Image (spheres, helix red, strand yellow):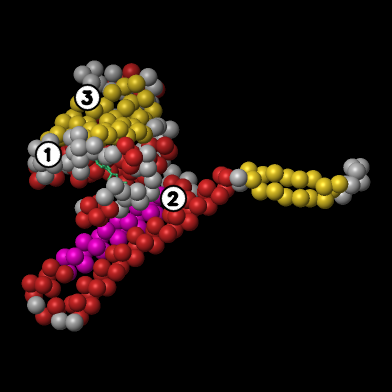
Amino acid sequence: RFSFNMLKSHEADRKPGIIAVLQDVTEQEELERVRQEFVANVSHELRTPLTTLKSYLEALEEGAMHDPAIAGQFLQVLLSETDRMTRLVSDLLQLSRYDARQQLLDIRPVDVSQLLYDVRERFRIRIRQERIDLNLELPGKGLPFVRADRDAVIQVLDNLLSNAMKYSNENTTVTVRATQEDSMVRIEVADEGVGIRQRDLTRIFERFYRVDKARSRSMGGTGLGLSIARQIVLAHGGTIEITSEWQKGTKVSFTLPIEEEREHEAT
Ligand code: ADP
């Protein structure tokens, strides 16, 4: 689409006339549409838990408060909805800091293998509880250090592993694999879970996009985990991709740049 502006030419050295200015506004309109959609989504995402909170509070006020069993149950719902709202707001804040480029990365040489062992440790209890196998595959010759913000990469892996576990059944395996590819290290998180249909796959990194809203919400999801992971990876100069087969499993893979100066130390 184009905007069309007519200007009168007044300059003395030109013949009087009219100048027509054609400007491509497709991109501006697209940005504005995305912005409006985002605001509408945020409002909706916040209103839903608020409606829940209000109805449970009303029920308590109208008498449920005096039945200890019901009151206890209602309070649990209130607490978990409040937690989810808190998570939503902090995810949103984080995204907007990356958008505004205010979130400065603390880039240092990071030992990827060590970081992956640490992340596996963080998930140890959850793995046992959910009866999922977590497989860590690292090259025998070791891996070079990467240039990265350690905490930010941990967050990416937390988001990807939480998803892999959320959308997998018991007695399946989640595999985390790291390999070297030229000047990058590639990290993959692969699961044998529910998978994502091709038609949803193209939109999966969009903010708030969820295949199954009810399932995501009931698991405490905000629909922002993958968008945040993507923002962090791009801020490092890496790339992130997702492949999936419906009912078979999903693989998310991202790259981080190698720290050239430390390369020889680790290999
Ligand atoms: P959420 O908080 O809903 O998990 P994400 O941004 O992390 O938000 O993921 C967006 C959506 O992508 C999820 O709601 C889910 O539908 C789908 N998804 C993400 N990871 C996986 C996975 N490993 N297996 C199947 N579906 C997934």
Q: Which numbered dot is residue 202?
A: none
Q: Residue at x 19, y 77 (%)?
A: 59
Q: Which residue is mark 3?
A: 138
Q: Residue at x 36, y 34 (%)?
A: 240
Q: Residue at x 37, y 25 (%)?
A: 184
**Per the image, is 252 magenta?**
no
Q: Which numbered dot is residue 132?
A: 1
Q: Within the displayed image, which quadrant is ligand 1 positioned in?
A: top left
Prevailing secondary structure of the magenta residues: helix
Where are the magenta residues, as a range?
A: 75-96
Above or below, comparing residue 212 to residue 113 in the picture: below
Residue type at the position of mark 2: Arg
In what element is the residue under mark 2? helix
Label 2, residues with CA under 10 Å away: few <14, some 14-19, many ≥20: few
Instruction: Examine the image and state in which quarter residue 247 appears.
Output: top left
Q: Which residue is mark 2?
A: 97
Above or below, comparing residue 2 to residue 192 in the picture: below
